Image (cartoon, coloured by chain):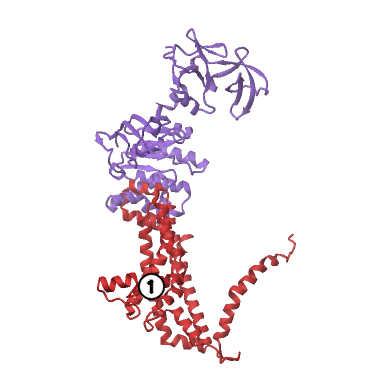
Chain colours: A purple, B red
């Protein structure tokens, strides 16, 4: 177990990268604390798998250093780093039994059969696969195969970090939930640092204590699920997390206030910086239909069970509203109000308003 | 309630006709010959199973069968491991992939009798590139028309040159189907390169290897054209494989009855070995 530090890590898949655009990872400077449960969240191609492979040692970064505690590991191959990784598609050794699969990492490191037996039994117990120990791994269902790949990662009790690269992609939806809880439980029991890569916000938010949101090769925000939801540091986070995502409304700054379609919108607090492009960000959950306020026309309203989602057009800007009220008619004129303490300003994409204390 | 419609038979008819002319009728003709004796003029006499007994007891057949198994055994023992080794060392991506693939495929595109003639000329002691080099430059006496050993080496090397590519290409296809994650997981699990081969690559190649071994077994067991053009079965009878012997009996001596009996025995051996091998190899797959 270890604290993992990435120092000015950059990576490009090209042999001679020139501009910033050639880098799949642009400057990552970050630490993962010992024993934490982290999620790396971002759309496909944002560099999260690259970052993961750099930590595991499958890739050597073009620039920068990686340390596990105080030990420099930048140049070390994966088997010397004492890490575990679970891949998108379950990797199992077809010809071996479940027992041999779980024992494989230990046997490769020359552990005594007695220790192997003890560890394998313990892990099998945790994963609830004990009855399958003697079946051939090739005959298992996908979710059990994935459990076995996780088990191979957890079977060594000295791993520095366990990494999951979108491990639930091939699992049936009703089993995803179970496996996710299992993972969370495992994290508490083995207490290893875990990094979970996904593009699915639900997975990231249920698994992790700290979520690292990435886009275009940079870390956009690091925070708890609540922080990411309540105070996105960037419009990308606002848009990416939440369903529907945050409303991002282009606005003008005049006399220290924000104006959207000529109307002054009350912000949570004073502005902290200026920018060329300014936008108001407010979550659909904090937009309410009111007798007065911003006027718009209902374009679509959908009942999604627990509440309704209304799409309102104000000029040519679309605003989503999450409401518990009655379903409005399409084409109806409505008035919107934003909850002031949840209305933020973004300058050039980054958060530019401060909460009133 | 289902309506009975016999018209479906018409759709099967073309296949039946094709199989009949392609396989059933020729085989039955052979069966017909195998139990009769003829002295020409289309006169036949019932012979029962005499020809089969005669063939099975004949030293000549035993010798040819022995040579055939030796040949096929050598071919499999060399081509399969060599094919795997070459497939493993081929690049997985980049500029050299198509170059390697095309180079590999070339020998297989050459007609069999041309291969035989090529190697015949190649190994001639006086003018062949290899023959001349061995005899006159290195001073190793090499003449496959004189020495059975030289003849055997030549036909085996020729077949390895001609057909190892098939094993390589099949194995390569098997290897390419392994996702990168398997290699990465093995690296993280601390597996040695032998363990990677034993537990990842070999199991993933099993299906294609089964096919490769089957094809190479059947083709080498039934081989005729190349050794016939190269050595004609000689020197003496030293490279007279089953098929060459069969043609000698059938068309050289015109003993149609024994030749037919021998064909059937030959066919039965090929079928039996292939069936046993395939059954054993695929047994564990279903449960």
Counting the numbered discs, the total is: 1
Residue at 35% x, 53% y is: B196
List the single residue furthest toward the front: B127
Residue A182 vertical placement versus A340 (above, below): below
Image coordinates of residue A11 in percent, x first then y, are 35, 35
Instruction: Please state which of residues A81 and B233 is positioned toward the viewer in this rendering.
Output: B233
Left or right position of B99 against A267: left
Q: Secondary structure at mark 1?
A: helix
- Residue B154 occupies which quadrant of the picture? bottom left
Name above or below for residue A348 compared with residue B28.
above
Residue B142, image x, y percentages: 30, 76
Q: Position of residue B175 (x, y in %)?
A: 41, 54
Between B135 and A31, the one lying in front of the other is: B135
Asked whether residue A26 is in view, the answer is yes
Pick the residue in front: A256 or A103.
A256
| Residue A318 image point, x, y percent | 58, 22
Q: Is residue B39 above or below residue B153?
A: below
| Left or right of residue B271, residue A107 in this image | left
* Other-residue count near label 1 (Cα within 10 Å), few / some / many at <14 / 14–19 / ≥20: some
Residue toward you, A286 or B17: B17
Position above or below: B277 against A111:
below
> In percent of the image, x 30 and y 51: which residue is there?
A108
Residue B131: image quadrant is bottom left
Which image quarter is the N terminus of chain B in? bottom right
Judge whether residue B204 can be spotted in this image. Answer: no
Residue displayed at 42% across by 45% down: A147
Farthest residue toward the top?
A255
Residue, disc 1: B121
Residue B1 in the figure: left or right of residue A80 = right
Pinpoint the chain carrying mark 1.
Answer: B
């Amino acid at each position: 177990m270890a604290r993992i530090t990435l120092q000015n890590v950059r990576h490009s898949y090209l042999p001679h990268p020139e501009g910033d655009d050639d880098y799949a990872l642009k400057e990552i400077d970050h630490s993962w604390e010992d024993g934490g449960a982290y999620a790396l969240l971002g759309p496909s191609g944002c560099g999260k798998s690259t970052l993961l492979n750099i930590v595991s040692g499958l890739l050597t970064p073009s620039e920068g250093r990686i340390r596990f505690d105080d030990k420099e590991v930048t140049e070390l191959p994966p088997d010397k780093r004492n890490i575990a990784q679970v891949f998108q598609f379950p990797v199992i050794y077809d010809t071996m039994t479940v027992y041999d699969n779980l024992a494989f990492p230990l046997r490769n490191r020359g552990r005594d059969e007695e220790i192997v037996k003890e560890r394998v039994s313990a892990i099998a117990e945790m994963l609830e696969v004990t009855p399958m120990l003697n079946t051939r791994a090739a005959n298992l269902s996908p979710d059990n195969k994935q459990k076995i790949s996780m088990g191979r990662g957890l079977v060594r009790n000295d791993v520095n970090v366990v990494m999951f690269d979108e491990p639930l992609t091939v699992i049936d939806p009703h089993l995803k939930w179970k496996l996710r809880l299992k993972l969370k439980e495992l994290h508490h029991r083995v207490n290893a640092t875990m990094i979970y890569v996904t593009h699915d916000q639900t997975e990231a938010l249920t698994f992790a204590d700290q979520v690292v949101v990435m886009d275009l090769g940079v870390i956009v925000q690091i925070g708890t699920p609540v922080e990411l939801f309540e105070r996105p540091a960037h419009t990308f986070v606002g848009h990416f997390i939440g369903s529907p995502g945050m409303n991002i409304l282009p606005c003008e700054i005049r006399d220290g206030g924000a104006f959207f379609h000529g109307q002054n919108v009350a912000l949570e607090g004073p502005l902290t910086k200026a920018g060329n492009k300014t936008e108001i960000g407010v979550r659909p959950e904090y937009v309410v239909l009111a007798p007065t306020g911003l006027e718009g026309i209902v374009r679509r309203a959908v009942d999604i069970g627990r509440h309704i989602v209304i799409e309102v057009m104000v000029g040519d800007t679309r605003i989503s509203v999450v409401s518990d009220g009655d379903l409005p008619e399409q084409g109806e004129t409505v008035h919107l109000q934003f909850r002031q303490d949840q209305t933020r300003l973004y300058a050039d994409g980054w958060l530019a308003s401060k909460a009133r204390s | 309630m289902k309506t009975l419609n016999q018209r479906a038979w018409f759709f099967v008819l073309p296949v039946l006709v094709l199989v009949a002319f392609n396989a059933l009728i020729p085989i039955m003709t052979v069966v017909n010959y195998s139990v009769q004796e003829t002295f020409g003029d289309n006169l036949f006499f019932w012979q029962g199973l005499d020809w089969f007994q005669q063939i099975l007891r004949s030293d000549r057949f035993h010798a040819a069968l022995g040579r055939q198994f030796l040949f096929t055994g050598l071919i499999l023992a060399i081509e399969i491991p060599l094919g795997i080794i070459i497939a493993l060392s081929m690049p997985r991506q980049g500029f050299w992939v198509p170059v390697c693939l095309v180079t590999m495929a070339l020998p297989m595109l050459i007609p069999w009798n041309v291969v035989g003639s090529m190697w015949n000329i190649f190994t001639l002691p006086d003018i062949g590139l290899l023959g001349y080099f061995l005899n006159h430059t290195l001073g190793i006496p090499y003449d496959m028309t004189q020495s059975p050993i030289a003849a055997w080496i030549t036909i085996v090397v020729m077949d390895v040159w001609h057909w190892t590519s098939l094993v390589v290409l099949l194995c390569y296809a098997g290897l390419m189907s392994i996702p990168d994650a398997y290699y990465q997981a093995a690296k993280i699990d601390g597996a040695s390169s032998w363990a990677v081969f034993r537990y990842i690559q070999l199991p993933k190649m099993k299906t294609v290897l089964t096919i490769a071994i089957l094809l190479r077994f059947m083709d080498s067991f039934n081989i005729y054209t190349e050794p016939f053009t190269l050595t004609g079965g000689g020197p003496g009878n030293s490279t007279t494989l089953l098929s060459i012997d069969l043609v000698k009996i059938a068309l050289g001596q015109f003993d149609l009855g024994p030749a037919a009996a021998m064909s059937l025995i030959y066919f039965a051996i090929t079928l039996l070995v292939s069936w046993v091998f395939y059954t054993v190899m695929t047994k564990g797959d279903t449960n």
